[in-house]
Image (spheres, helix red, strand yellow):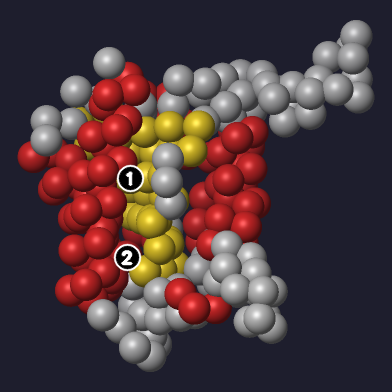
């Protein structure tokens, strides 16, 4: 079976201690281990070893990034993790430069990643309701999808050569939470994604 790295990127606050993200990360770990996968999990807010995280990315067949969306992006501690781990990995372990060459200095920016056999999945929690997305009549996102909003995270993964799996999103978790429904959807998402991913790998 495959090797899976789960990154819990939640940053605990008094108003949002990160319980749902911790639950989703553990639920993914338990489900995937029950299916025979080997799983490593890093809880970013608890601290981490940069070198070990680079090697875990190289070890993994799939990276699951679990995080709440804070101010339209990942929490600051998860961004710090990316800054530290990904920068160290630019020594050739995660990417061989930025993809450009002396012969073609203007072409192929961002295509130097060395994790070309690795998949990744985003799993995000939102205060925003699902109805705020994919609707041009909604004035804030103006028709944007969840993946449109999370494009910088997708591009970070693409920079290292990783290929996307379908994104999971839990919405309106602060004001109108439907936790049991979200957990059931998450279970179904994992079953679908990893069943399909296994067939592709085979």
Q: Name the residue under label 1.
A: 6
User: Is the residue marked by circle 2 packed among few (<14), some (14-19), or many (20+) residues within 10 Å?
Assistant: many
**Quadrant of res 159:** top right
Number of labels in the image equals 2
Q: Mark 2 points at which residue?
A: 21
Which residue is located at x 38 percent, y 85 percent? 174
Residue 87 relative to residue 26: left or right: right
Which residue in the rendered view is the most extreme toward the left? 34
Which residue is located at x 56 percent, y 56 percent? 147
User: Of 98 and 192, which appears nearest the observer?
Assistant: 192
**Quadrant of res 194:** top left
Residue 51 coordinates in the image, percent (x, y): 46, 32
Give the CA distance from mark 2 to mark 1: 11 Å
Residue 106 coordinates in the image, percent (x, y): 91, 24
Say which quadrant the N terminus sits in: top left
Q: Can residue 66 be seen in this view?
A: yes
Residue 36 relative to residue 167: left or right: left
Which residue is located at x 25 percent, y 62 percent? 185
């Amino acid at each position: 079976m495959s090797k899976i790295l789960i990154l819990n990127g939640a940053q605990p606050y008094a108003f949002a201690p990160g319980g749902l993200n911790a639950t989703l990360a553990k639920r993914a770990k338990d489900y995937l281990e029950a299916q025979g996968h080997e799983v490593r999990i890093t809880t970013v807010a608890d601290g981490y070893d940069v070198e070990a995280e680079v090697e875990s990315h190289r070890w993994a067949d799939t990276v699951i990034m679990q995080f709440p969306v804070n101010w339209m992006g990942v929490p600051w501690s998860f961004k710090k993790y990316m800054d530290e781990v990904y920068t160290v990995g630019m020594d050739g372990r995660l990417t061989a430069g930025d993809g450009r060459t002396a012969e073609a200095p203007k072409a192929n920016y961002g295509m130097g990643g060395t994790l070309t056999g690795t998949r990744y999945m985003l799993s995000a929690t939102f205060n925003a309701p699902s109805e705020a997305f994919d609707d041009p009549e909604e004035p804030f996102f103006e028709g944007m999808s969840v993946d449109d909003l999370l494009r910088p995270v997708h591009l970070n993964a693409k920079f290292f050569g990783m290929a996307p799996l379908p994104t999971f999103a839990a919405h309106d978790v602060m004001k109108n939470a439907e936790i049991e429904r979200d957990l059931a959807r998450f279970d179904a998402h994992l079953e679908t994604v990893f069943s399909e991913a296994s067939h592709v790998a085979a």
